[in-house]
Image (cartoon, rainbow, N blue to C red):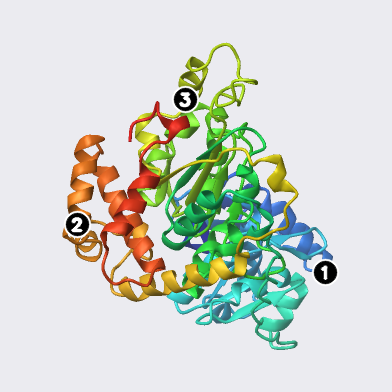
């Protein structure tokens, strides 16, 4: 007789069901695992044998065959240990077989029978719920998986607890969802003195999820401004929190099973590789753009990133997802993020200061910012010049608006967008709007359309640029509480779109 249990194999954030079949048959003593296992899965036989021995269970002198079905799907990871052990225990009639056929299990085994936490408990629980099964996982991973309310989650510390639960001697209580991670303390926008235009651009970017780039001399406050973006963003909705947590679960970043309502803020160094930014590696892990899903990706010293890395951002910015292609699989990750970039105007950084600029001005600026291609620059909705703040202003007391005030306006604008896109699949913010829906919600009045048409012709805006101006104008109107997009809204959107002094070498 063949005993069965189920587990999952991960393809991105998707968990594909895998059936673990165990047969104990006459023949020379052997323990074989088939079904395209990787090295970690093949080594499971030694961990399972030692874990059972620690419980006083000796394997019979027979041939044990474990088949992982479907056989053509690559099996990667140590989380196959527990389902293999469960199927083997059922084949040895230590636990009832009908119980194992109703579960999805994942977990790594120590040699003493302890069940070690593994990544991916949350997407595994989603897959189990879709199959109307319950989930068996390590106790430390159970609070994370229990957030899927449609799935009963059983968390066990040891393999002995698993035997006690399914034999009926010591049933385990279903796990409870982990605590919502406490909100982080954000830096206040009021600490930034001056830079009112940049603050306004940040408010617009936060309200509509518009990409923005800041260019200014060293020390002008670009990084300081970016660090305060999380403080004006609204918390994640329940759907967004689940989406983001599934990615972080696969990446092993969830702490103690808690799900955070704070939007991610990722700021990789400019020496990061393409695989680190986009995703990849041997097991096609999510990159920074996916870890920033529903949050902010801040790229400081933007032109210093390798050209190949920057160019790979173009498609994810447009589509909101990234496909990592491998010879034997294609893994898809969501990556709908707000891109913030910061750069100096030139290599020396002081192109606008005659007293400190190098001898190559203005060629140095054209060469330096020329590392950002025109198609990539065209994807930035907001382009900001961040001039240095006068020393006299640094001694003045803080007088700007606090983050809480700006965040309240952003939340109201987001609420208007939630209502607007309630029935639009795949659209949540104005930055997502396209096609007929964009023309419907962002159609400017006659004066606004005349202004936009004239500017588009004069500055040779691309079709993408034209539509991005409409999206930004729609967001500005939302911040103002206006149902219609009027000429002042269009004018402000155009002012952020057109290149300023340090950006003069880039196409509008």
Q: Which residue is located at x 31 percent, y 49 percent?
A: 468
Q: Residues within 10 Å of mark 3 (few under 14, many from 20)?
A: some
| Placement of the C terminus among the 4 image quadrants | top left
Which residue was labeled with disc 1? 56
Q: Classify 222 as above or below 483.
A: above
Q: Percent position (x, y) of residue 476? A: 38, 61
Q: Which mark is residue 204?
A: none
Front position among marks 3 and 2: 2
Residue 324 located left or right of residue 165: left
Which of the numbered marks, if any, corresponds to residue 371?
3
Residue placed at 52% from the left, 46% from the top? 340
Dot 1: within a 10 Å radius of its alpha carbon, few (fewer than 14), some, or many (20 or more) residues? few
Q: Is residue 29 visible?
A: no
Quick one: label 1 or label 3, which is nearer the N terminus?
A: 1
Tell me: residue 131, above or below residue 463. Answer: below
- Among the two numbered marks 1 and 2 on one chain, the one whose residue lies closer to the N terminus: 1
Query: Relative to 401, does residue 388 appear above or below in the rendering?
Result: above
Nearer the observer: mark 1 or 2; the answer is 2
Mark 1–mark 3 distance (CA, rounded to whole Å) = 65 Å
Horizontal and vertical percent position of residue 3? 55, 70
Mark 3 and mark 1 in contact (Cβ < 8 Å)? no
Q: Secondary structure at mark 1?
A: loop
Give me the disc on residue 447: 2
Q: What's the distance in space between the residues labelled 3 and 2, CA to CA? A: 37 Å
User: Under tag 3, what secondary structure?
Assistant: loop
């Amino acid at each position: 007789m063949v005993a069965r249990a189920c587990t999952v194999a991960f393809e991105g954030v998707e968990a594909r069901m895998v059936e673990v079949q165990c047969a104990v048959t006459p023949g020379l003593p052997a323990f074989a695992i088939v079904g395209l296992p990787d090295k970690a899965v093949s080594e499971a036989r030694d961990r399972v044998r030692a874990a059972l021995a620690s419980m006083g269970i000796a394997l019979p002198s027979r041939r044990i065959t474990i088949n992982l079905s479907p056989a053509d799907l690559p099996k990667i990871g140590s989380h196959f240990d527990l389902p293999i052990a469960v199927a083997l225990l059922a084949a040895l009639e230590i636990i009832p077989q009908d119980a194992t056929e109703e579960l999805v299990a994942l977990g790594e085994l120590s040699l003493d029978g302890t069940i070690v936490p593994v990544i991916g408990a949350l997407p595994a629980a989603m897959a189990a719920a879709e199959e109307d099964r319950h989930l068996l996982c390590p106790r430390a991973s159970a609070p994370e998986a229990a957030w899927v309310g449609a799935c009963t989650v059983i968390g066990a510390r040891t393999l002995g607890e698993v035997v006690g639960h399914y034999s009926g001697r010591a049933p385990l209580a279903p796990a409870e969802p982990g605590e919502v991670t406490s909100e982080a303390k954000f830096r206040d926008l009021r600490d930034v003195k001056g830079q009112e235009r940049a603050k306004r651009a940040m408010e617009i970017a936060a309200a509509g999820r518009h990409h923005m780039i800041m260019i200014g001399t060293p020390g002008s406050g670009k990084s300081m401004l970016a660090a305060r973006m999380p403080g004006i963003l609204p918390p994640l909705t329940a759907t967004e929190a689940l989406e983001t947590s599934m990615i972080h679960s696969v990446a092993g970043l969830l702490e103690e099973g808690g799900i955070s309502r704070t939007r991610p803020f990722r700021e990789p160094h400019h020496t990061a590789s393409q695989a680190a930014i986009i995703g990849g590696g041997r097991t096609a892990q999510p990159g920074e753009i996916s870890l920033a899903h529903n949050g902010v990706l801040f790229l400081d010293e933007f032109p210093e990133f390798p050209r190949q890395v920057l160019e790979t951002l173009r498609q994810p910015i447009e589509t909101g997802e990234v496909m990592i292609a491998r010879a034997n699989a294609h893994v898809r990750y969501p990556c709908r993020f707000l891109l913030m970039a910061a750069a100096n105007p030139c290599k020396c950084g002081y192109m606008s200061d005659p007293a400190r600029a190098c001898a190559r001005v203005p060629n140095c600026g054209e060469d330096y910012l020329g590392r950002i291609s025109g198609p990539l620059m065209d994807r930035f909705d907001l382009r900001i010049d961040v001039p240095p703040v006068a020393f006299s202003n640094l001694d003045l007391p803080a007088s700007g608006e606090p983050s809480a005030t700006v965040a309240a306006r952003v939340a109201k604008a987001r609420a208007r967008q939630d209502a607007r896109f309630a029935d639009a699949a795949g659209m949540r913010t104005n930055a997502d709007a396209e096609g007929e829906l964009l023309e419907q919600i962002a159609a400017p009045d006659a004066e606004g359309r005349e202004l936009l048409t004239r500017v588009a012709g004069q500055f040779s805006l691309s079709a993408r640029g034209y539509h991005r101006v409409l999206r930004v104008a729609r967001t500005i109107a939302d911040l103002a509480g206006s149902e219609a997009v009027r000429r002042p809204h269009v004018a402000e959107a155009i002012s952020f779109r057109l290149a300023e002094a340090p950006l003069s070498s880039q196409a509008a």
